[in-house]
Amino acid sequence: MKVPVSWLQRYVEVPPVDALLSRLTEIGHMVDGPLESTEKGPVVSLEIRQNRPDCLSILGIAREVAAAFGSTVRDVRTAQLPDEVRHSEPVAGEDPVYFLRIKGARLDGLPASMLGDLGRYGQRSLSPLVDLANYVMIELGQPLHVYAAEHINVASAGSRSARSGESLRLIDGRTVELSEDDLIIADRHAPLAVAGAMGGSASAVGPDQRDIIVEAGHFRSRLVRRTARRHGLATEASLRKYQAAPARAPADCAEPLPRAASRAWPRRGMRCVAKWPGA
Amino acid sequence: MEDGIAALTRELSALTTPARVRERRRALLALVRQRFQTLGQLAPEERRTAGGELNALKAEVERLATERLRALEATGVQADDAFEPDLPTTPARVGRVHPTIAVLRRVNAFFGSLGFDVADGPEIETDWYNFSALNLPADHPAREMHDTIYVMEPDVLLRTHTSPVEIHAMEERTLPLRVVVPGKAYRNEDTNATNNSMFYHYEGLAVGDDIQLGHLRWTLNAFLDYMFGPQTQRRFRAKYYPQVEPGLGVDLLCRFCSGAGCSVCKVKGWIEIVGAGMVHPNVLSAAGIDWTRYSGFAFGMGLDRLVMGATGIADIRELYGPRMSYVPEV
Ligand SMILES: [Zn+2]
């Protein structure tokens, strides 16, 4: 995984890069690529082994650095969440999923500092909301998916096994034929996304989307792995999911996005509105 | 030149075996043919003269050769038993030990000197021996590291490492136990210069009373001294493998860049040689060993990488392809 030191520094005091790399290698995160230098500082490349999916994030690496060098991880909750934000109860079942509604998202691009971190990590910029979801995923390790609010019926939405005969057109343009072995996110109308891997094109957010639903799920890793493998969906999100990145507390799950959003667009009047099934 | 041919033609009558006569006739007729091809460059008058001479020469060669062959036949010289010690022979290729086997024997000799026995086992394995018994239950994310070739899904497969033989060894032998396991392993990988779907794996295992990480470290250090020389810099670092806890990666300083980073070491400065660690309690239990009483260490390496280092062969496909050029001519 690529770790821009500038991003890591948000969470932990970073020692000189030579000391950082030799110590991380010693404790099991081997340097596995060249050290890149950028004007915002170096970008290091680490091999994260399968027993440490919790390290597939900037925060995860920051914890390792803090533990290895005897420092502490900073609390970076810079923005207060608006009072209206409530996360939903998880949708029951073995693969719980959380939804959060955000109204009035303002869609300028992310600030240059956040876009710069994304670029140095190796994630290209797609659209403001997707960039924001990617930013949260890379920083905290929790994959999020963003839906256009008018194309998902949250009250009936949840995770379930697909039924044979169902199919889903994905955001990359491909249509996959689903089977009972596939875990999907769906509402009462139709499949919406392949859980933990890729969203469908019908509910994708467009450039002018202002009312969105954020989804965060805790899926059984073997289901995500099998589904992702069967349909060739090896994405950043599925990598984290099928390596069983640790479950986060519900409050940590979907809230980072509005929090990051208020960091990205501090003076915009964005309202986050809780919406949960049955409401 | 003409004199040379004439002399060679006259000598026909003095050759001592039918084979030599036939050989000389063949050479002379080839020369005559060559001459005929140059006639076109001559003026018509000269061409006629030269052509006549060549025809006469050809007739003379045939006549002398036939005469000599009859004479030799009459004196009873048989073509077959003509021993001709000065004729060149066709080059012979002599089979040798394959470079992989040569290195394998060297490594076996070292571990043999430490009391390790060589263990062998099947290349077609069950899921239990190849994965589950090695602390890799179904759906363990570390199975992603092994792209498996199945003989019969989901239970029968080509072994992806020689570690299953260690489980067999623990089941079949008595403690204390020291074995090395060289052998072929298979993975469903795209073939390129560094990966092949078939490769040689080399594993080692020691189980007994009070076996500690220090024993492993000493053993691997002694092995690296033996293979690469005591001056070769190496490092031991923590590395996860499901079969062991704690796990180690052992690297050698890249000899091409001395640690600065180059294409051979993929800019790491170090080249990984061995993966190792203390045998995981789950693995000991799976093999029926009481892990509260016994402990053990295990290590594994890709033998091909050692072979490529020792022979300078840079492409693993060359090692297992039909390349006669690696068989020396003698
Ligand atoms: Zn090198």
Image (cartoon, grey):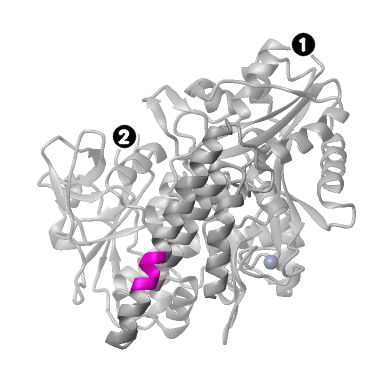
Q: Nearer the viewer, mark 2 or mark 1?
A: 1
Mark 2 vs mark 1, CA separation in Å? 48 Å
Instruction: Provide the secondary structure element on which disc 1 rests.
Output: loop
**Does ligand 1 reach within 8 Å of label 1's beta carbon?**
no
Residue at 27% from the left image edge and 85% from the top image edge: B44
Camera-side residue of B63 and B36: B63
Main secondary structure found in the magenta portion: helix
Q: Is residue B22 above or below residue A118?
A: above
Q: Amino acid at mark 2?
A: Gly
Instruction: Provide the secondary structure element on which disc 2 rests.
Output: loop
- Disc sitting over residue A171 in the figure: none
Residue A3 seen in render: no
Chain letter, disc 1 residue: B
Q: Give residue A255's quadrant in the image.
A: bottom left
Return the residue at label 2: A93
Residue A233, how many percent across, how many down? 31, 52
Give the farthest residue toward the right: B230
Return the residue at label 1: B174
